[in-house]
Image (cartoon, rainbow, N blue to C red):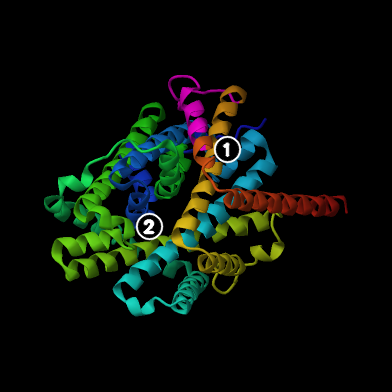
Amino acid sequence: MEILQSQDELKREISAFQLGTNIFNYIVGAGIFVLPATVAGILGPSSLAAYLFCALLITLIMLCFAEVGSKITSTGGVFVYTEAAFGPVAGFIISSLLWFGIGVISDGAVVNALYDIIERLIPALSPTYFRIGFIILIFGFLAWINVASLKYSLRLIKITTVGKLLPMLGVVFLGVAFIHPAFLKWSGFPHFDTLENASLVLFFAFIGGENALSNSGEVTQANRNIPKGILIGIGAVIILYLCIQVVCQGVMGSALAGSSSPLGDTAEKIVGPAGLLIISIGVAISIFGSLSGDVLATPRILFANARDGLLPGFLAKIDHKRSTPKIAVLVYSALGCIFAISGGFKQLAILGSAAALLIYLFTVLATIKLRYTMPHKSGMFRIKGGLLVPILAVAAIIWLLSGLKLIEIEMVVLFIVIVLVIYFIGHFFRRKNADA
C-alpha cells in the first residue's frame, strides 16, 4: 500500500493556537444563527444537553481526524483518507457526499435560514413566490460572481467574514443582564429519543472543523500541538455556543422555540427594534458570506472529479477568458437552488448532518484501519487510550444516524446507489478508452 505522506517536504509552521483558530473559524458558520430556536423547540431549557453531546462527539471525531491527518498529508482531506483505507469506490462516495451533502444540501438549508431572517424584518415577503425568487436571485448572483472572477469571490468573502462574530458576541455580552433564571430551569434530563432528534439537527452547527485538520502535516510538534489545537478550537466553539443558547433561552423563555431569528429576537428584547434590525443585518451578512465561501470552493470538487474522469467531462471545462470552472459552478448553483426551493431549513439541515456523519464515520473507521496497516513514524499523532476514542465515536455516530426517519434514510441510500452507478459507468468507459 502506498503511503500518502509527505512529512519531510512540508514545513511545520502552524502553532496549536493557529490550528485552534482555524478550527473555530471553519465550524462557526450560519447554522448557529438559527438552531438555538430549533433545539429549544425540541428540548426547551434542557437544550444545553444536546450542545454538550454534540461537543463531545465532535471532539472525538476531530481527534480521529488528527491521527489520520498526521499520517496522510496529501491534499484532499476526507476523500484521500477514505481512499487510502478503503479504496477508490469508497473515496468517490465520500467525495460525492462532501460536495452534495455538506455542499448542496447545506447551502440549501442556509439560504432558507437567510430568507427567514429577511422575512422577519419584512413580513410582506411571506408568500412562497417571493421565497423562490429570492433563492434564484441569491444562487444566480453567487454563480455569476464566481464565474466572473476568483478575485471578486475572495474579496466578497473577506468583506462578509468580518460580520461573523459581531452579532453573536453583541447578543451574548448585552444579554447577560437580561437573563431570567426561571427560563433556564430544567424539568428533568431529556428522554434519549428526544435528545437524539435535537442532536441530529444541532450537529449541523458543529461540522466543518475537519478542513483545518487537513494541514496536520504542517503543525509544529504535532504530538502535542494537534490535540491542544483541537481542544482550543472545540473549546472556544463550545463556550460560544453555550453562551448563545443560555442568553437566548434566558431572555426569550418559551418564546424562543417559535423564533425564526433567535439572535435578532433576543436583541430586540434587549435594546428594542433597533437591536433586531442591527443583529438581523449582521446575521444576514454572515450567512451570505458562508454561502459565498461554499459556492467558491465546493464546485472545485466537481471540477476535480470530472478532470480525473470520475464525473462527466463537461464539468471540467474552464472559462479560459476568466480562468474559472464555469460549468461546475453553474451546475452546483443550480442544484443548490433546486434543493433550497424544495425544502426548509430544518429538513435540509438534518440531511446535511446525516451526510456529514457518514463522512465522519468513514474517517473514524479509516483511523482504525490505518493504525494497523500504515507504519507509525516519529512526528505522527496517535490518540491515547488505544481504540477507545474511535469506538466511542463510531457508537455515537451510529446512534445519531439511527434517529433518521425512513424517508431520510431512503434519500441517503438512493443517493449512494446513484453515485455507485455513476462511478462504475465511468470506470467502464475509462477501461474501454485505456484498452483502445
Task: Indicate the secondary structure of the residue bearing disc 1.
Answer: helix
Inspect the image, locate mark 1, and give the three-letter code of the amino acid beneath it. Phe
Where does the magenta region start and end? 374-397
- x then y, percent, for residue 81: 57, 38
User: Which mark is on residue 362?
Assistant: 1
**Percent position (x, y) of residue 7?**
50, 33
Q: Quadrant of residue 365?
A: top right
Q: Is residue 311 above or below residue 399?
A: below
Question: Going 11% across and 51% down the picture, which residue do you hit?
Answer: 177
Q: Which residue is mark 2?
A: 30
Most extreme residue toward the right is 436
Q: Is residue 159 visible?
A: no
Q: Is residue 46 visible?
A: yes
Residue 87 percent across, percent down from the top left: 68, 38
Label 2: which secondary element: loop
Sequence order check: which comes first, mark 2 or mark 1? 2
Q: Say which residue appears at 57% left-offset and 74% top-offset.
A: 321
Pick the front one: 224 or 90: 90
Compared to residue 319, the image places residue 13 above or below, namely above
